[in-house]
Amino acid sequence: MCNYACACSFCHKSGTENHSQWRITIGNAFNSNKYQWLEVDLGERTEITAVATQGRYGSSDWVSSFLLMFSDTGRNWKQYRQEDSIGAFTGNSNADSVVQFKLQQPVFARFLRLLPLDWNPNGRIGLRLEAYGCPYKSDVASFEGSGCLLYRFSPNPTPIRTAKDSISLKFKTLQNSGTLIHTEGQQDRSLTLELHKGTLLLHLRKGKGASTGPESHTVVSLGSLLDDLHWHHVAIERVSGHVNFTVDKSTQQIQVPAELSPFEINEISFGGVQCHGTQMVLSRRNFHGCLENLLWNEVNVNDLAKQRQKVSITGNVTFTCAEPVSVPVTFAGAQSFLQLPGAALQQRDAGGGGVFRTWNRAGLLLTFDLQQQVGSLWLYLSETRVRLQIHKAGRILLDVVTGFGLNDGQWHSVDLTARRGRLTITVDKEESSTAHASPSFPVVSGNNLFFGGCPDSKNNQECRNPFNVFQGCMRHIHVDNNAVDLIKVQQMLIGNYSDLQIDMCGIIDRCSPSHCEHGGRCTQSWSTFHCNCSNTGYSGATCHSSVYEQSCEVYKHKGNTTGLYYIDVDGSGLIKPQLIYCNMTDKTWMVIQHNNTELTKLKASSGINQHLAYFNYSADAEQLGAIITQAEHCEQEVFYHCRKSRLLNTPDGSPFTWWVGRTDEPQTYWGGAVPGSQQCGCGLQGNCIDSDHYCNCDADRKEWYNTITNYDSHSRPESEAAYRVSPLRCHGDKNFWNAAFFNKETSYLHFPTFHGELSADISFLFKTTASSGVFLENLGIKDFIRVELSSPMEVVFSFDVGNGPFEVRVETGGMALNDDRWHRVRAERNVKEASLCVDSFPGTTQKAPADGHIHLQLNSQLFVGGTASRMKGFLGCIRSLQLNGRTLDLEERAKITPGVSPGCPGHCSSYGHLCQNQARCVERYNGFSCDCGLSAYAGPFCQREVSAYFKPGTSVQYTFKEPYELTRNTSTQSQSSSIYSDLTLRGENVSFSFRTTQSPALLLYICSYYREYLAVLLNRNGKKQRDKENTKKKSFLAFLNISMIRSNTPLFSIYFYIYRVNPNLFVLGKVQESGELDPEIARLNSLGFSGCLSVVQFNSITPLKAALLYPNTSPVIVTGPLAESTCGSSSPANTYPAETTHPLSVNAIKSDSALIGGVIAVVIFVILSALAVMVRFLYRRKVTFHSQEPKSIKPEADSPEYPFHSEPTSQNVLSENQKEYFI
């Protein structure tokens, strides 16, 4: 059947009994245009599996692209779509070749229609068509909203529990709500399947009525726009403890709650719930439509109903499917409009309207000019509401608004009536959505009414559309209470139209199923969808990429310090981010807290009751498992304190106590013993207090003993016990440092096929000296995905999902990437866009083609460092390669692959800048470390100031080696480098910081082997310094003089250079051996020093750091109270130089023997006067001051003062402007 003239045509059916082939030949149309089609009537509903096309024989006529439609009745057509988005099929490129398409999902229909879109421009529409399929058996039942079928099982006092039950059916309806299935089971358990606003809801419930609690009621939704009068397949399958719920091509698995299992069904009703004699609260109405092939465990319920066997019929149920006549029309594009004739000239009243559905928030519904040149009327959607306006000469004569939320994809009716001077707009036939107006002029339509839009014509003065065009579907259009026959419009018998799809509704729900991942909220318009990723922890067009790092190790190597951070252990995977405490010490520890870290006392037991302890961690079981798997080492201590409380009942008894870990298996080893040994650590080492037992607690003594173990206890009435479980601590990240070195262009690693059909993200770090090379590649039959270094300054991400090759490029603007430093690459491809980021360079994003192919289909192995397409391989290192959040083990595969080596050294070239304050970067196999031995600072990056608060009696005395030993000392150990040093300098560098409210005070004292000394004093500086308000004046003569510091004390940093003094003793605070001190110094020394000293350094020696961190291995004597503090911590962003009044000079070396000093001075003056001038010039002394006003001082997170026992509730705020060294 076709609506244009044919030169010849015939239909022939052939094939076997189970498979048929229909061949149709169509000649050419005399006038080819896009409003023609080919329609085939197969005689009955048939399963269509494939179609094939060919051009007209011996001609230049063929169709190059087309749409495929299907229908049961020859009305209300539905377009066949590939991958839910591709509608057009690629046809022929000549008249002879055959193009066949196997349908991904078979079509069950009687009528098939082919709509040509493009054809040979040098010919006309010509086509030979073959359709392939199989016979289809259909048993239908029709429900009119008042009937139902009740299927009762034979009464059985002991119901048989089956491992699997299933219900399947097909349904079609025009109503958006109604109950399809309701089952009743044992103990008031029920299952209900209802259609609600075009979506199927599956209810699993225990109990009846509104009092059913949420814990006994599970609801799952699936499907959308199911009220389109087309068949939809539904299957519900119970397998053990879960239910598989399928609607069309989407399946969701539901874990059945314990209170709803086991589930034995006594009876099933189809079409409603009245068959059970009760009206359920959740049921809104009975089903109105057709059900096909009702199967319960492969039993055909329709057959039983026809035979009146085990199935009773209530109400009006027939076994034929009588479909209502409904002709929808689709407004798909910007040029779509429908023009209909208006009212007669003598008509005094006007009206119009219809039913529409759309996703857009705005769009023109109806417009026409009013008679008598009154003005123009516009009825349109504005911000999801219906608005009516009448304009004349730019003035708004009337403005009426009603309705709300009309862009939800549901059918909504709108009726406009103008009668006897009263204008009424009604939405959804509801009184609450009705608006009235009483214009002072007649509202009568002119010659034409325009629906959806206006003709695209410069000469068109009758239709003007200042608003958006309407994109959606309409049906039941009426003008002046007369229904419009859209089939006559299609046949060009009435009206006019452009770019419409008549007799079908082409609306698509792009949010069902949703492509928004990780809980992103999907919203849509007619042509696209949008994902709102707010509060998900993920970003991107589909909320695919995590905004958090995967471990504390990664945060550390971005320059972050100790604190709380969100960790997403699997990146874009399914595991949610978790707030975790990161302790950035030399090792980066992840600390996972739980709810029971305090000491817990146990009550005595009679031997029957057990004490069970449960621990709720700040991360769930899946997160904990991923953290432990990813970490290099994890540990958790459990302290068990016992007094006459046996733990393991060793050597031969059954254990009284055990613990259960993440494997859910009871364990009976404790305190360093090996698994399965049923011992404590002392039993393994043979040093238990009682050699007859393998655990101290089993000695059953009255004294208290401690065992570092894991938990749970059970004891006798006279016994006492307590336990404490520490947080779980893990350090290291095996994924972050997992690397491989490719030393040949022909070498590569191969892995299983990468599965990233709808979303694919690839991230890795690389370093190389080569100018180009392929990082990775995976091929399919036609599809592929590849990331490569195309030049020293460009990275390319390319792929093909069936729309042709697609490339995303990032150029570095002249900065070379082959500099043998680590660079980070991140590429992502999803159904909306593709993006590529390299380090911190501006990323590139490209939108995916609209309504194009979306599935990436690969089938070969994944090649890393090389390629299967003979492109140039990669030379260099690849590290931390992750695909969709899963890390590939490059090192393990490299061990067995020629031309590839596991690991990759040379991290200091990229991360060495993180080592601060003269620290030295040290290479490691997996990473690097900062050696703080020559720095007065500590911490993982030597950025933590080592400070201490001194009290008046506190003294730190550092003793230097003898001079002859100094020249022989060549130790280079990192720890002792801050304690011992080869002092062969010809001058000394001294630096420290202090904060105090005391004045005067002795800050620092150095004496030499020659009874010389250097003293740094804090003195009041008299009236001269107080004359200038708010100014701190400093002067140096024999002493360092600084004015009195106010109560809000700044932090002063002091650095000066002095001649070589051969020091013997270095003292901070009070000098204990004060017998030979200068009287002035002795007077100040008697007061002691009260305040803060920080980052004290004498050349490469750090006395304060040695006293605080290495007191047992350093030549330091500490007198009085001394503990490390954060009193010297400062914010480097707010440093200001202290005001000075003159250049500072240090000449603080005084001799106790004036005679010797005079002789030395004369000799130097006579013999080396010229040299002295040069020496004075070359070795001039320098002193600089820096003052700093800290905003606030609070303990560092890794100090003992940090209140870590509290539960984490906040995260360190990372500055948006914080510099990142890699992405």
Image (cartoon, rainbow, N blue to C red):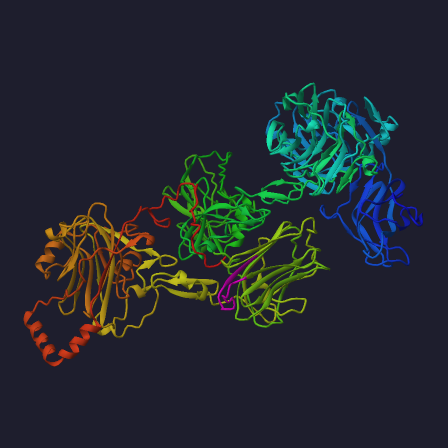
- In the image, residue 888 sits, relative to residue 178, either above or below, namely below
Q: Nearer the viewer, residue 262 or 416?
A: 416
Q: Residue furthest top?
A: 420
Q: Which residues are magenta?
A: 811-826
Q: Nearer the viewer, residue 1033 or 255?
A: 1033
- In the image, residue 490 sits, relative to residue 776, either above or below, namely above
Residue at image point 11% right, 66% down: 1150
Describe residue 719's horizontal placement relative to residue 1112 as left or right.
right
Q: Is residue 1019 magenta?
A: no
Q: Residue furthest left?
A: 1155
Q: Quadrant of the N terminus?
A: top right
Describe residue 1018's horizontal placement relative to residue 637 as left or right.
left
Describe residue 291's horizontal placement relative to residue 976 as left or right.
right
Question: Residue 165, can we see it?
Answer: no
Q: Residue furthest front?
A: 372
Q: Position of residue 672 (x, y in %)?
A: 46, 53
Q: Based on the displayed image, in which of its 4 quarters is residue 774 positioned? A: bottom right
Question: Residue 595, can we see it?
Answer: yes
Q: Position of residue 282 (x, y in %)?
A: 67, 26
Q: Position of residue 755 (x, y in %)?
A: 66, 54
Name the dominant secondary structure of the magenta segment. loop
Q: Nearer the viewer, residue 782 or 850?
A: 850
